[in-house]
Image: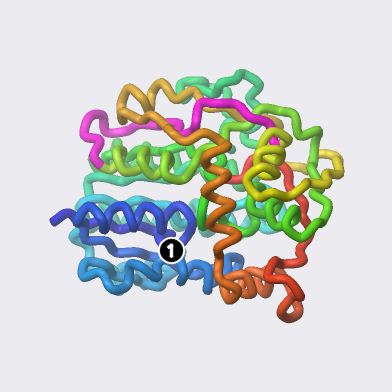
Amino acid sequence: MSHALITGGAGFVGSHLVDRLLSEGWKVTVLDSYDPSYPRAAKEANLAGCRARGWFRLVEADVRDMASLQSLLEGGYDVIVHLAARVGAGASLADPCGFQQTNVGGTQNLLECARIWGVRQFVYASSASVYGLNPRLPWREDDAGLMPASPLAGTKASGEVMGRIYSHLYGIRFLALRLFTVYGPRQRPDQTIHRAARAMLEGRTIQVHGDGGAPRDYTFVSDAVDGIRTAMDYGDLAHEVINLGSGRAASLCDAIRALEGALGATARVEFRPAQPGDLPQSLANINKAQRLLGYHPRTTLEEGLHQFATWLTGSSTSSLIALHQALGGAGIPASPFPDARGSVSGLMR
């Protein structure tokens, strides 16, 4: 039986991957710190269906704490999928040192653990944000013009470099997957689609930073998980950087219009100046993923937003209360949706 260590496995993308692996008969160990920036109740709900599975183990620890990683994790893994990270370009401007410690230091710790344990396959969740201000769309992995525009993007690029070093020195196969705006059920409450949807359901104004018309690459979570899953089995070159996007362009305004149809709600939009650190545009060239991983994203934006809307409107009251409290609410709102500002902006993984 194959054994995977999934860091950040209680989160949005991670929990979907855990579900997939358990359904295939894998033994899965999840490492998650339950960082307070993410509602704990929501993360626990993400893994609710996994706890009764015989080959599932949850370890609560921080990737920054090497001593805890070595004492709580037993090794014996066939693959490490490193999804744990602090995210959000704006948040990284407010706490660049914290992002460096978690995203760079934590990745260093996991790579060192892989070396000590003899793990030969390491899949790393990088980000489209590493392309930054590169104007040449669609973005290709072999384009040397990376122009990160936020501390978040810088930490993800640093993780890619560190993985290349460990691959060269210690023979660890390292695959850096540059994820493009993943959305869908279980999406984090701070992400663009989720914030806009909650604002629409509450009848609040959505503040769009920028003109909302630039191309974006929205990738449905099941398609992203397909790419991660096949990367776990990749067995050719020792180091690869691969885009995981939809390969299709849609603007933020396109996404908001599609959300209106999915939710049966009307959006009220206010345009504001672009924010520092936001990506002005994004679009993935996915030829490499198709060639190496057999990656073929299937879900259209409209289909994916309908699935997201079904999940959001079907969420339990207790889960939504937890989201409200995590976003600074001072009690239970009159309606089950948080009364947070509906501000949305650039690409958020």
**Dividing the image into 4 quarters, which one contains the C terminus?**
top right
Q: Relative to the observer, which residue lies in front, 166 or 324?
A: 324
Q: Residue at x 72, y 57 (%)?
A: 201
Question: Residue 245 lies in magenta, yes or no?
Answer: yes
Look at the image and give the residue range highlighted in magenta: 233-252
> Which residue is found at the position 52% from the left and 42% from the top?
304
Give how far across and how far down residue 219 sits, in percent.
Answer: 51, 38
Residue 315 at x, y percent in the picture: 56, 65
Note whether 75 is above or below 269 in the view shown: below
**Residue 147 in sight from this viewpoint:** no
Q: Locate residue 95, reporting x and y percent.
A: 67, 58
- Above or below — where is 92 with respect to 60? above
The residue most toward the front is 264
Q: Is residue 225 magenta?
A: no
Disc 1 marks which residue? 10
Task: Estimate the x, y position of residue 21 in percent, counting from the top left.
Answer: 28, 54
Residue at image coords 73%, 47%: 344
Give the structural element (helix, strand or loop) at label 1. Answer: loop
Residue 10 in which image quadrant: bottom left
Q: How many marks?
A: 1
Q: Amino acid at mark 1?
A: Ala
